[in-house]
Structures are given as C-alpha cells and as structure tokens.
Image (cartoon, rainbow, N blue to C red):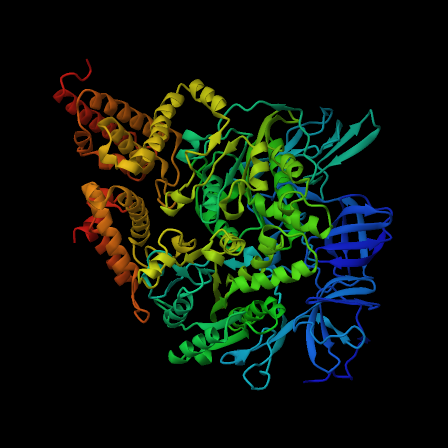
C-alpha cells in the first residue's frame, strides 16, 4: 500500500503529501503510532486527514499508511451486548487489557473471529440466492436470533453449504457460483460495510404502526411510528438523557443501538450497570441482550465523535436487514454537529450560521433519512427508528441545529424547563411538541379495535383549554372563574399528576404496558366527560373533589401493576359509582 | 532567573518570525512535534514556557504561557523539549502552593517527584469507570436533601459576582464526609484569574479547619499572564488523578473561576483568527471544557475518586451565557446561587428549582441515606415550584384573595426557605436532621396535596 509523509498537524487535522493514489474517505494510519484517520480532502498530491485519536506528539515527516478501503464496520454475531467507541473499537476488550484509559493506536478487532458460534443452515446446495438472503441462523443471545445473510452485491447458486455445527469467523459457511459474472463468492459469519453508505433494501414502505415505548406522554400524545424519526430538544437538566434511556429500556424494538455522542462518560457507565439488571417486559430477558452501545464521550477525540453516529446507524441497518425493528438513540446530535463545526473550522471553510458549516443541514438530512421501514433484500420487513437528542445552547430552539433538525424529523418532543424544574418527568411539553405520525397511529389502534384517538382528544382538549385558562387565572385568580372552568383546571392537574408524570425509578411506573395505558386513558376520559355533565347538571366542584377514591386514581400509575385487571376494574367501579351518587342528587343529570 | 541550560540536547533557535498577542510564529524549525513544550528566553534571560499549536515541516505556531512582552524578533532564543507539557506529581505536593504550570510558589524547593505526567491526561475508557453512588454529606441541607453530591461527581456552583460561592465552597470542603467511612478528602485547589484576596480566603479557611497540609494549591491569580490559566486546571487535575488513581486517595477538586479560564481560551482563539461561535468563544469550547470536567469520577479498577466542584460566575447572572450553558451540559448537575435570595439574607442562597444533581437518584434512598429521601426531595421540588406560581399570582391579586390551599403553600414556601435552605456557615447538619426539616415544612400542606410521597411514608412521617 502507498505511504505518504506528514506535512502539517493542526489538532485532529493532519496534512500529508505523496498521497496521489488516495481516495476520498479512505482510511489511513497516521504516524509512527499508526493512529486511525480518514481522508476528507484531496488537493493535488496533498491529502487532508481527520484523525480519530489524539495527535499530540505527532511530527511532520512521519509516515501515513494508506489502506485502500473506506471506513467500515465489521458485522456479525457478537455485536449485541458490546460497547464500542466511535470507530467500533471494543471498549470492554480494551479495558480487559488492564488499562483504564484508551491507549493511542489501539487496534483490537471489533468482533472475536475465533469465537465459535452454533450455525444452522437454512439453504441447500443448488438454491439460487440473491444478495441479502439468509443462509442460516445463529442464536446470538437468548432473545435474538441472528440471521447470516449474503453480503450486498454477491449472488449465485449454492455449491457448498456446511452442515449445522460450531463455526468461527474464519470458516467459510457457503460458496456461491455466480454464472452471470462467472465468479465464486464465499460467505462467512462476518461481513464489512462502509459506514457512510446506507445499506441497500428492496424498497421503502410506508409507516404503519406506532413504536410503543411505555412512556405515556409519548404513546398517548406524540407517538413515534416504527421507522420514523424523532428529535428531543431541551436545555441542560431538562432530562434528554433520562428520556432517551427510558425509551431505550422500554420501547418495543427488538434491537437498541444507543449512541453516546459527545456526552458524559458516567452516563454510559450507568447504562452498562443498569441494563444487564433490567428485564425486557416482552421477552423476560436482560435488556443488555438486545442493546449495542456506541460511546464517544465528550473528552474522547472529536473526529471520532463525528463518525460515531454513522457507525451506530450502520449497525442498526444490519439488524433491520434481518427483519427486526431497531431503534437508534443518538445522544446528542448537537455534539455531533459541533464536531462538524470544529473540523470545518480547522479546514478553514467558510462558515454559515453560528460557525456551523453550510453542509450541516445536508448531513443531518442524510442521517435522519436512514430511518425507515423497508422491505429487506431477503423479502422480510424491518424498520430503523431514529431518536436524536438535541442540546440547543441556552435552551433556545431557534438555533441552527434544532431548526435544521425539525425539517427532517416528523416527531418533536420538546422538553420544557418549567416542567423539569418542578421535577415533572418526562418533561415533554404538551404545548410545543407534535407528532406527524398521528394518522398512522390512530389507524393502527383502530385496527386493534381500541378507541385510542377519541380518548386522546378528550385529554388533549382539557390540556389545551387549561393553557388558555391559566393566562386568565394568573390575572384574576382561579377562584374567580366559573365552576366549569375551574373543573378544567382541576382535571388538567389530575391528567398531569396521574397520567403524564411518570417516575422512571418506581418499580411499577417505570414501564406502563399498552393495556394499562389504554385503561388509564379510558378511566380519565370517562371521569372528565362525566364530571362536565355533572357540573352542567348543577353539581359543584367541591362535590367532585370530595370523591374519596380520587387519591387512589392519582396514584394508580404506581399502585396498580401492569397486569392487575382486578384492581383496575375495582377502582373504575368505585369512581363511577361515586360519580353516579353525585348524579342522583341533581335531578336534571342524565335527562 | 534561570538561564537556558546549554548542555541540553537538541537545537536552540534564535529569533522568531512574528509575535502576535500570546502567539509566536517561528520559521526554519525542524522536527517539531504537535503539542510539544517550548522554552523561550527573552534577551534578558527570562525563561518562559510555550506550547506548539500548529506545526508544518519547517514552521511552528507557539503559544507562550508567560506572555510575549519583552520578546524580540531577532534575539529571542527558543528550545523544543521533545515532550508535551508535564508536571511533577507526588504525595508531597499536598500542603504546597504552585503556579499554574506546577512550579513552587511558596519559596520551598521543588517537591520530590515520583514521576512527571502530561497535563492533558488521557480519556478514561467509559467501560473502566465505576458508576459514582457514595453519598457525601456536606452538612448543607439544600445540597444533601435536594441536590445530593456523590463521590466522583462533577457538580459546579453557578454564581454571580458578589455572591457567597467561595464561602459555600469552603464550607463544603470543611464539612464533606462519608457516612460510614472515616475517610478525609485530599483537596486540590486551582484558582484562575481570581484576586489575591480570594486565594487568601481559601488558605485561611483551610488553615482554620486544620486541613492545610492536605491541600495542594495551584494559583494563577488575576495579575498572572492570562495564558497560564489555560494550564492551571489541567495541572491541578493531573495531580488529582495521580493522587486518586495511583495513591488511592479521595480527592475533592475545587476550581475557581471557570469564566476566567474561558476568557483566556477566547483570547488565544481570537489571536489565532479562528471562526467564533457564540459571544466570540471558539466552537470547540464544549470539547475543551469537557476535557477537564470529564476528569472526575471513579475507576472500576479501584483506587480513590475525583469529585469536582468548579465555580463559575455567570456574566450578568445570565445562565444561558455560553460558559454556564456548556458547563451545565457536561457536568452532572449544578448548584445555582440566587441573587434575590441572597439580598433577602438567605445563606446559602441556593436557588430551589434550577439547581440539580443528576447523580442524586443513585446516591440516596434505601441503604444509602433513608428510604423516603427520593420521594421527599421530589415532593419538596414539586411543592416549591407551586409556591413560585402562587407567589406570582399573589403579586397580582393579593395574598388575601388566594384560596385556603394556596395560602398554605405560601406558608410552606416561607418555612422551607427559612428553615430548610437557610443555615449557618458553620452549621453541619446530618442527613436525618435535613430530612426532618423537610418533613416539618411539608406538614404545613394538606395530606392529599402530597402525591409524590407514598401512603406509608405519610403514615410514618407526616402524621407522626
């Protein structure tokens, strides 16, 4: 391979000459320490390289080794449960070498090629296979069946397939004879894919189902579709990471890719400690079995932060191609955008808004567009949903990253400072958030014979009316309002406390099953509608407030377990009979 | 002043091409490494340190820590030392005073160093971290009860000029302890661009409480060259890492004032002609701050811990200013001091709602502080946030017009501020005392308003 010579070092940006044969986005090894870098500009024989490791101590005159291939990730069984850095170096294996820090020039393989996996073939000799089709299965973890696929751009007739047994990364499992190209292909457990290039699929499909998350404010008010893209913007301390982690824990995706991009080291440590202890409510297995972590914390080199979100989404697409629903959490895309800005500044490019490069919206678009529901090459159906946190400076949503992001997502969960200050979590504002996936979601619930949309409307109307009333109440005091409007303020408070606020540390409330959510919605909607009727019939708010079981209703989220139908119907009975009792005292009620 | 030693290996260069603010541009230099340390001598023999910021095959851009005054184009002599900026580290550095680059400032000789360490440190592998969860009792209710500090956390104080952040930091340094271990914190103190009086205040305070020999101080005061402030916190953290991870000590690092640090960074960035982002600060301010704040924590390999308490003054009390804003995005919470509360005579004036400790949830509760602690804290936040709303309503319609429940909230607010938040500068409260005070305030509210605590807790503490 070719070798160049370093001519300039400016932080993570290095220039080298004698690079005539290098390609754009080619991976190179820089200096005597062989630091990993990527070519990002070629001018004549001089290449500009962004280096993914600290360049301290590097000198002009040291060599640059070309590799001839773009930055790629290794795909295969063993990814799940692992923690990688931005360029897919396994942080757990590096730590196992006995150092608590990340040494420079470290090159541990992403996956263990020696490890034996139990492979079961699903094809036979003579089958004609296309790229992306499944040749066999490996039980990667107890809850996830890994499908071994033919890498893109390979096809042909099976001339050899190994019998079921134990194989490692070096073994050839299947050979294909491609008659049209007159070549043979060998397929093993592992394959490589360049991170900046989306993996191919047969076609994109319209979104059809909500990604249920167990967070009531999301599932009820601002649902995300499977294959959709959402953003969580919020100033510091409003709970972006807490919300991302809650989603990563409980959303019903089969695989979670959690990208810690320029954030705190302790947050990744927390996930590493907490996830193995938690069980997935759907499979009963440890959550870590379905999770891949990509950690490029804020103190790790900035260029690797830029690439980490591509690494993450490529891993997600790989599992999508097996026919799974995958959710990608990127925390935070603002730090990624800042990495772009820093690199762009060092390249002396002309800046656009607030120093960000002019291609920022383009890069954001190409990232969020990798979300979607597709028909995979093997004919199954898979989705990648993307949830990106945004950290706007000063909590001001008019800054470039938030503004550009809103153009490429369809679900906006705005975190509210006042809610966070009152420790109302998740602090997703019902005033400024929105979801454009409502029609798809409503249709899906309707197909499941559930009256989701109407009940949502009842609750949402109360909250919207309350927002208007609060303005007046702030001027004249709530007691000066008429009875029905005071009822609105009262029930809005119940919706906030009993339904929207969710305690992610409470053993019961941390995850709310769809069944319980619908029951809670129905109970509240019923309570609200009946209360309005009672007030109309002459009842007073004081009478409604005096219902003894209101306190129980306010605490139902943490007192009634997800599957305790008996407790649910018992509470419902008591509330309804209490409302009936008030009704009987007012003759005009129900007439 | 020491002469440049002539018997060192390596080339000595005479003359520089350009001098521009804190930066020096050199031509015809060879074999220079990025980030390398440079010794520069003025014509009178005064030696300054510098660091390479940008290097090509025959040029180097160097930032000079001691300032560029008295440097001349023709007769400045310089020598590249072949390694990045390092400071000596040893346990003997406790009890001593150094400048920002780790050189003694107390008139005593250099400490016997076991080794020299690169001030930039290395990023910790997130996999090798231990999640911090040991409760530190500071004896201050507004912290222990509402914004708990844990060992290995980075929790800054967001303050303003004239607010008692120094007194509060000194109180924490004096009182901080673990509940069931008899461990004392070693303290590493870094001051950047603060007045001599401030540094003096800390020395006196450490002396009074008899911990001075357990404190290492790195001082780069207001009249020291501003570029030195870039290195001061890094020197302090390098020593802290050595003490914590190599010597197994538990270290509390107090850094003041981060705003001055950021201004020094802005100065360099402007001199280099970099594209600014907000308020003239460079686009990499976040990454730069993170490279220091992230040097807090614990390792799973054992050893001690680094708990960081940076202090920063918010320019015109604006929490959305880039320095507090980016700090808040990196640190694990923040203690915000409130001017209005301080004017009303409340000490410590910890603003109830914007203050936050992110690691609190795992450091408190059963087996750590007390079972009801998480719920009590959440309930106090919820109730106090309601107090704020009711107060603004009362300002419009008058207190008499408030509903009876709202009147109770007003009473709760007063009691909360005057008994839970307010305390003496030398008052060291146990966590039990703090919780009791919290419940005493909550008792002013009707039971059905308290939805964040459980029925059992209400039975046990509310009715009792």
Residue B144 seen by the camera: no
Judge by depth and name the residue closer to the eye, A111 or B153: B153
Towards the viewer: A255 or B257: B257
Who's the residue at 68% across and 67% down the image?
B22
Q: Is residue B295 above or below residue B116?
A: above
**Residue B274 x, y percent position in the rendering:** 68, 55
Residue ID at (79%, 29%): A177
State the image quarter where residue B41 is shown.
Answer: bottom right
Residue B152 as seen in the image, left or right of residue A21: left
Which one is in front, A199 or A121?
A: A199
Left/right of residue B30 with respect to residue A127 in the rendered view: right
In the drawing, does residue A217 fall left or right of residue B79? left
- Residue B302 x/y as whole percent: 50, 65
Quarter of the image with the N terminus of chain B in it = bottom right
Q: Is residue A25 above or below residue B431?
A: above
Front residue (pair A351, B301): A351
User: Taking B19 as reference, is A324 above or below it?
Assistant: above
- Residue plotted at (21% across, 24% down): A535
Q: Is residue A485 in view?
A: yes
Q: Is residue B218 left or right of residue A238?
A: right
Quarter holding the C terminus of chain B? bottom left
């Amino acid at each position: 391979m070719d070798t160049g010579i370093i001519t300039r070092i400016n932080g993570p940006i290095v220039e080298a000459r004698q690079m005539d044969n290098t390609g754009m986005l080619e991976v190179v090894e820089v200096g005597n320490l062989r630091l990993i870098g990527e070519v990002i500009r070629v001018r004549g024989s001089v290449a500009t390289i962004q280096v993914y490791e600290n360049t301290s101590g590097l000198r002009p005159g040291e060599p640059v080794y070309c590799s001839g291939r773009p930055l790629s990730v290794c795909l295969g069984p063993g990814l799940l449960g692992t923690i990688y850095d931005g360029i897919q170096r396994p942080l757990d294996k590096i730590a196992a070498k006995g150092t608590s820090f990340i040494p420079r020039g470290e090159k541990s393989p992403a996956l263990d090629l020696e490890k034996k996996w139990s492979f079961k073939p699903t094809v036979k000799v003579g089958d004609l296979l296309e790229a992306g089709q499944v040749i066999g299965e490996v039980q990667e973890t107890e809850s996830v069946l890994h499908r071994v696929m033919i890498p893109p751009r390979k096809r042909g007739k099976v001339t050899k397939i190994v019998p079921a047994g134990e194989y490692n990364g070096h073994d050839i499992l299947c050979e294909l004879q491609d008659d049209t190209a007159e070549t043979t292909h060998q397929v093993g457990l592992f394959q490589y894919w360049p991170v900046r290039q989306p993996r191919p699929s047969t076609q994109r499909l319209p979104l059809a189902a909500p990604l249920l998350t167990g967070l009531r404010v999301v599932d009820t008010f601002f649902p995300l579709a499977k294959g959709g893209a959402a953003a969580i913007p919020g100033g510091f301390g409003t709970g972006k990471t807490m919300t991302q982690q809650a989603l990563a824990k409980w959303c019903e995706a089969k695989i979670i890719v959690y990208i810690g991009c320029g954030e705190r080291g302790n947050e990744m440590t927390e996930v590493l400690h907490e996830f193995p202890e938690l069980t997935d409510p759907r499979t009963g297995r440890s959550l870590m079995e379905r999770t891949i972590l990509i950690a490029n914390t804020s103190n790790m080199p900035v260029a690797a932060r830029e690439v980490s979100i591509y690494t993450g989404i490529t891993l997600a697409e790989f599992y999508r191609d097996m026919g799974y629903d995958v959710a990608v959490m990127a925390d935070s895309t603002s730090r990624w955008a800042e990495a772009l800005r820093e690199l762009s500044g060092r390249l002396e490019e002309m800046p656009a808004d607030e120093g960000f490069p002019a291609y920022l919206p383009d890069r954001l678009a190409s990232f969020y567009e990798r979300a979607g529901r597709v028909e995979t090459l093997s004919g199954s159906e898979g989705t990648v949903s993307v949830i990106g946190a945004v950290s706007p400076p000063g909590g001001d949503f008019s800054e470039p990253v938030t503004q550009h992001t809103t153009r490429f997502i369809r679900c906006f969960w705005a975190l509210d400072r006042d809610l966070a200050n009152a420790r109302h979590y998740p602090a997703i504002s019902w005033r400024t958030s929105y979801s454009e996936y409502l029609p798809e979601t409503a249709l899906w619930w309707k197909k499941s014979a559930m009256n989701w949309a109407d009940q949502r409307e009842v609750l949402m109307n109360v909250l919207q009316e309350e927002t208007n009333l609060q303005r007046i109440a702030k001027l004249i005091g709530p007691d000066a309002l008429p009875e029905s409007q005071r009822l609105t303020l009262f029930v809005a408070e119940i919706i906030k406390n009993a339904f929207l606020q969710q305690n992610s540390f409470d053993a019961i409330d941390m995850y709310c099953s769809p069944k319980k959510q619908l029951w809670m919605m129905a109970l509240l909607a019923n309570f609200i509608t009946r209360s309005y009727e009672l007030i109309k019939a002459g009842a007073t708010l004081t009478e409604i407030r005096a219902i003894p079981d209101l306190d129980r209703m306010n605490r139902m989220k943490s007192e009634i377990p997800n599957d305790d139908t008996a407790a649910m119907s018992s509470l419902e009975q008591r509330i309804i009979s209490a409302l009936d009792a008030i009704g009987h005292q007012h003759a005009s009620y129900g007439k | 002043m020491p002469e440049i030693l002539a018997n060192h290996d390596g080339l000595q260069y005479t003359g520089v091409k350009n001098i521009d603010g804190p930066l020096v541009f050199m031509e015809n230099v060879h074999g220079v490494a990025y980030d390398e340390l440079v010794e520069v001598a003025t014509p009178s023999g005064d030696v300054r340190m510098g660091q390479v910021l940008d290097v090509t095959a025959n040029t180097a851009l160097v930032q000079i820590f001691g300032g560029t005054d008295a440097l001349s184009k023709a007769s400045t002599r310089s020598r590249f030392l072949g390694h990045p900026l390092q400071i000596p580290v040893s346990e003997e550095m406790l009890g001593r005073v150094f400048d920002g680059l780790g050189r003694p400032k107390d008139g005593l000789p250099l400490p016997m160093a076991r080794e020299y360490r690169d001030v930039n440190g290395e990023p910790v592998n997130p996999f090798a971290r231990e999640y911090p969860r040991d409760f530190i009792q500071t004896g201050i209710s507004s912290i222990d009860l509402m914004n708990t500090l844990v060992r290995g956390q980075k929790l800054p104080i967001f303050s303003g000029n004239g607010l008692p952040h120094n007194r509060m930091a000194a109180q924490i340094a004096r009182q901080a302890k673990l509940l069931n271990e008899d461990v004392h914190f070693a303290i590493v103190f870094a001051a950047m661009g603060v007045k001599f009086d401030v540094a003096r205040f800390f020395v006196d305070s450490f002396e009074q409480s008899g911990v001075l020999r357990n404190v290492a101080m790195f001082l780069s005061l207001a009249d020291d060259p501003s570029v030195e402030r870039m290195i001061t916190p890094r020197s302090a953290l390098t020593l802290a890492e050595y003490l914590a991870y190599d010597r197994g000590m538990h270290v509390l690092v107090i850094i003041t004032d981060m705003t001055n640090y950021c201004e020094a960074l802005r100065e360099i960035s402007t001199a280099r002609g970099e594209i600014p982002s907000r308020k003239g600060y460079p686009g990499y301010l976040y990454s730069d701050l993170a490279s220091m704040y992230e040097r807090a924590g614990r390792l799973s390999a054992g050893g001690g811990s680094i708990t960081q308490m940076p202090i920063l003054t918010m320019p015109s009390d604006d929490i959305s200013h880039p320095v507090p804003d980016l700090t808040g995005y990196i640190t694990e919470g923040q203690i915000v001091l409130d001017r209005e509360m301080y004017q009303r005579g409340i000490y410590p004036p910890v603003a109830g709602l914007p203050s936050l400790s992110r690691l609190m949830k795992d450091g408190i509760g059963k087996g750590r502080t007390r079972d009801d602690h998480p719920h009590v804290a959440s309930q106090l936040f919820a109730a106090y946030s309601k107090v704020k709303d009711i107060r603004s309503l009362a300002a419009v319609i008058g207190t008499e017009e408030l509903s009876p429940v709202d009147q109770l909230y007003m009473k709760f607010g007063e009691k909360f501020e005057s008994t839970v938040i307010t305390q003496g500068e030398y008052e060291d409260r146990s966590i039990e005392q703090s919780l009791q005070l919290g419940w005493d305030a909550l008792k002013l509210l009707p039971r059905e308003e308290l939805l964040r605590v459980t029925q059992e807790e209400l039975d046990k503490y509310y009715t009792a």
